[in-house]
Amino acid sequence: MTDILNQVKEYYGKTLASSKDLKSNACCCSEESMPREVRKVLPLIADEICDRFYGCGSPLPALLEGAVVLDLGCGTGRDVYVASKLVGEKGRVIGVDMTTEQIDTARAYLDYHKDKFGYQQTNVEFHQGYIEDLASLGIADESIDVVISNCVINLSPQKELVFREVFRVLKPGGELYFSDVFADRRVPEELSSDSVLHGECLGGALYREDFRRVLAKVGWPDFRYMSSCPITLDNDEIAEKVGMVNYRSCTVRAFKLASLEDICEDYGQVAYYLGTIPGHPHYFDLDDHHRFFTGQPMLVCGNSAAMLQDTRFGRAFKVTGDRSVHYGAFDCSGSGNADGGSGSCCC
C-alpha cells in the first residue's frame, strides 16, 4: 500500500506539471460533456487550477444549493471551487488530497475564488490526508450531503476502505457521485503495480463486476450509472502493456438509503417530476435510463422511488404509492410510463 501511495504522490506531485503531460486520455474530460451549470462556472476558475486538472468526468450532480460537499482526491481543487459556487455561500465544500504540491496550489487560491464569487468569506477548506482514513481528518459520521470524486478512487490500493469511509460520513439520504475508470476484467497484478499505468488511472482500475460486489458489501445494493464512454489507448507504449483490457470512463451515483433492495421490486409506485431543479426545467435524468419529463407520470421500482423521495430530490418530485402492496419483480420489459406511452424503464 505504501509503495503505491508514494508512486501516486510522485506522479501527481512531481512527474506531471499539467494535464498536457498525461500519456493517455483516461484522465481527461471535454467541457462538452459537462452539465451547463458547471460550464458556466469554469470561466471563473483560476487558470493554474484548470491547467493542473486530471479528472475523467464531471461528478457534480444537480441541486447542490446549501449542501455540504466532500471531494475525495481533490488535487488542485477545480471541482471543489466549482462546487463552491454551486452550493452557494451557505453551503460548504471540503477537499481532501494526499499530495503536498496539489494541496498547496489549491490553498493558494482560496481568496481568489472567494472574491470571484462575491462571497464574504470562503466556504471551502482543504485537508492533506488519505481518502481511506477520513476520520483522522475530523470528518464526522453522517456529516456530508454529497461525496464527489474525479478519477481518483482507482488510484487507491484499498478501495473497499474508501467506500466504507464514504458510507460512514454520508448523511442518511446522502449521495456518492463520482467519475472513474473501470475495466472489463481484472488488471493483471504485474501491470497494476506499474507506476506509469497506475498514475494514468489504468493499473488500478476496478473490474466493473468487482466494483458492484464491493458496493453491495459496504451497503449499496443498488447504484446507478449516469454515463459511460470508452477510453482509447493512443499511446503505443501503454497499449503494448495493457491493450488487452477494455477501459471505460463512467460516472456513478449511489444513495445511502436503508430501503434499497438488491433487485428492482414493483410496488405500483408512480413518480412525477415537478420541473423545479435549477437548470432542468423540462426533464431530469436520475441515471442513464431514467429520464423524467416534467409533469409526466412514470412507473418506478421501489428503489427508484426511494432515490427520488427520500433524498434531497424529494422536493422536486411527487411519488404516489408506498410499499404496502408488492407486485413482484419490476417488469423491465414493459412501459415505464403510467399512461401506457413509451418511456424509460427500470434497470
Image: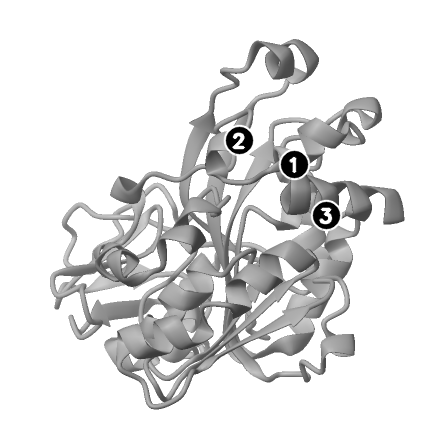
Q: Are marks 2 and 3 in contact (CB under 8 Å)?
A: no
Mark 1 residue type: Thr
Element class at badge 3: helix
Residue beneath the point at 62% across and 83% down:
142
In the rendered image, residue 42, in percent from the top left (x then y), is placed at 29, 57
Which of pointers 3 and 1 indicates the residue nearer the eye? 1
Q: Callout 1 environment at 10 Å: few (<14), some (14 to 19), or many (20+)?
A: some
Which residue is under mark 1? 15
Residue closer to the observer: 179 or 336: 179
| Residue type, numbered disc 2 | Asp
Question: In 3D space, how far apart are the residues under numbered discs 3 and 1 (Cα atoms)?
Answer: 9 Å
Using residue 295 as the reference point, say whether residue 53 is left or right of it. right
Q: How many marks?
A: 3
Cα distance between the residues tagged 2 and 3: 15 Å
Q: Left or right: 89 with respect to 276?
A: right
Q: Mark 2 = which residue?
A: 21
Q: Nearer the viewer, residue 92 or 225?
A: 92
Q: Position of residue 266 (x, y in %)?
A: 42, 61
Lower position in the chain sequence, tag 3 or tag 1: 3
> In the image, what residue type sits under mark 3?
Lys
Label 3 neighbour load within 10 Å: few <14, some 14-19, many 20+: some
Q: Name the residue that disc number 3 marks.
A: 9
Instruction: Please name the colour scheme applied to the rendered image.
Output: one colour
